[in-house]
Amino acid sequence: MGSGKSTIGPVLAKKLGYRFVDIDREIENEHAMTISEVFAQRGELYFREKEAEKIAELARAKHAVIATGGGAMIEEINVKNAKAGGVIVYLKLPFDILYNRIKNDSGRPLVAANTPEKLEEIYNRRAPVYSACADLVIDADFSVSDIVKNITDLL
């Protein structure tokens, strides 16, 4: 959460001549509700199932940059599907920068439901998994244009 997937993704997609797909927006559009509402009305497990379905579906898409939710790559099946369809890029930032970006965003269910300490715990569990499953680990503490250039150079 807060790494810049939804900001960097469209710029990267444009540079590559691809389309950009944000899985959270896809789920919101399909359900006519926000992610927070999906979590509240259907639960996180339901959201994660829908997220996995979208990743499996979109992994077969050609010429697309896909932004997943913050917890998507924790699930092995999502990693397998994403790798089968393309390259996984991890936009890496330290927790303090991420937290400063997300701390006032009540539209993020995990932010609204957890203390800063719990969010840091989640980060500490997820970060090594992200590093391990990523094809590219990108230091995301730069401008959007520098990050996009770094990704395209490595691709």
Image: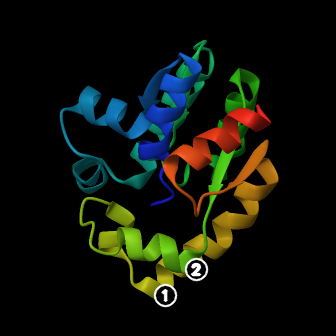
Q: Looking at the picture, how far across and down is residue 14, in whole percent?
A: 48, 24
Q: Looking at the picture, how far across and down is residue 29, in whole percent?
A: 25, 29
Vertical arrangement, residue 46 with respect to residue 71, above or below: above
Is residue 40 visible to us here? yes
Q: How many marks?
A: 2
Q: Amino acid at mark 2?
A: Glu
Q: Are marks 1 and 2 in contact (CB under 8 Å)?
A: yes
* Other-residue count near label 1 (Cα within 10 Å), few / some / many at <14 / 14–19 / ≥20: few
The Cα–Cα distance between marks 1 and 2, rounded to whole angstroms, is 6 Å
Q: The residue tagged with tag 1: helix, strand or loop?
A: helix
Classify residue 66 as left or right of residue 130.
left
Residue pointed to by mark 2: 121
* Other-residue count near label 2 (Cα within 10 Å), few / some / many at <14 / 14–19 / ≥20: few
Q: The residue tagged with tag 2: helix, strand or loop?
A: helix
Classify residue 108 as left or right of residue 55.
left
Residue pointed to by mark 1: 117
Name the residue: 18% across, 33% down. 32
**Front residue of 96 and 114:** 96
